[in-house]
Amino acid sequence: MNYACIMVQLCKSPKSPKLAASLAAPLDDLLAVELFRALSDPTRNKLLSCLAKCGRACSVSEIAECCKVDLSVVSRHLSMLANAGILSSSKEGRTVFYSVRYKEVTLLLRNLAHAFESCCPDSATRNVASKHSKIKQGKRNDR
């Protein structure tokens, strides 16, 4: 007789938020307060968007042209985005250049999405994906 050993991992969700809080999960490490704080400001979002669409390292004064904010304020916003790991900076003389850390940000957000997906039941993931697909199709039809 031949026997096959099959291991099955049953994944049960904790019965309460209190129990869930006591469990370690990748999601805990990825939900960095500094990252979300950096992304929570509309001006920082606009600066990040302009810099990302530009596709190259830009000086603070170049980036400041995107919005109607004082140069020193723009510099502080960019510094906060850099401290959160979203931007990298380099200095040439007195000029500071910032660029988007595309690879790192993409990987971080992708890992965060996977961590959220691993927490929810399969049917919930399918429902969200289905709703998202319908929303995207609806937006295309509106054009």
Image: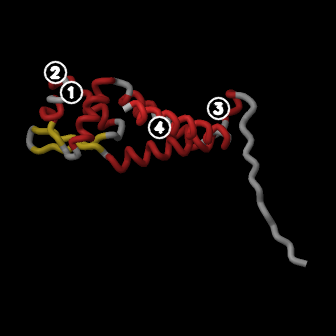
- Label whose residue precedes the other's in the sequence (2 or 4): 2
Dot 4, how many residues are within 10 Å of its Cα: few (below 14), some (14-19), or many (20+)?
few
SS for callout 4: helix
* Picture residue at 29% right of the left edge, 40% below the top: 87
Specify the label residue 137 is tagged with: 4
From the top left corner, tell me how far across and down residue 24 is, in percent.
Answer: 62, 40
Q: Which of marks 1 and 3 is in front?
A: 1
Task: Give the residue at the far bottom of this rendering.
Answer: 1
Q: Nearer the viewer, residue 24 or 133?
A: 133
- Can you tell which quarter of the image residue 49 is in? top left
Spatial CA span between label 1 and label 2: 6 Å
Which residue is the site of mark 1?
Answer: 74
Q: Nearer the viewer, mark 2 or mark 4?
A: 4
Mark 1: amino acid: Val
SS for callout 3: helix
Dot 2, how many residues are within 10 Å of its Cα: few (below 14), some (14-19), or many (20+)?
few
Specify the label residue 70 is tagged with: 2
- Can you tell which quarter of the image residue 47 is in? top left
From the top left corner, tell me how far across and down residue 74 is, in percent.
Answer: 21, 27
Spatial CA span between label 2 and label 3: 42 Å
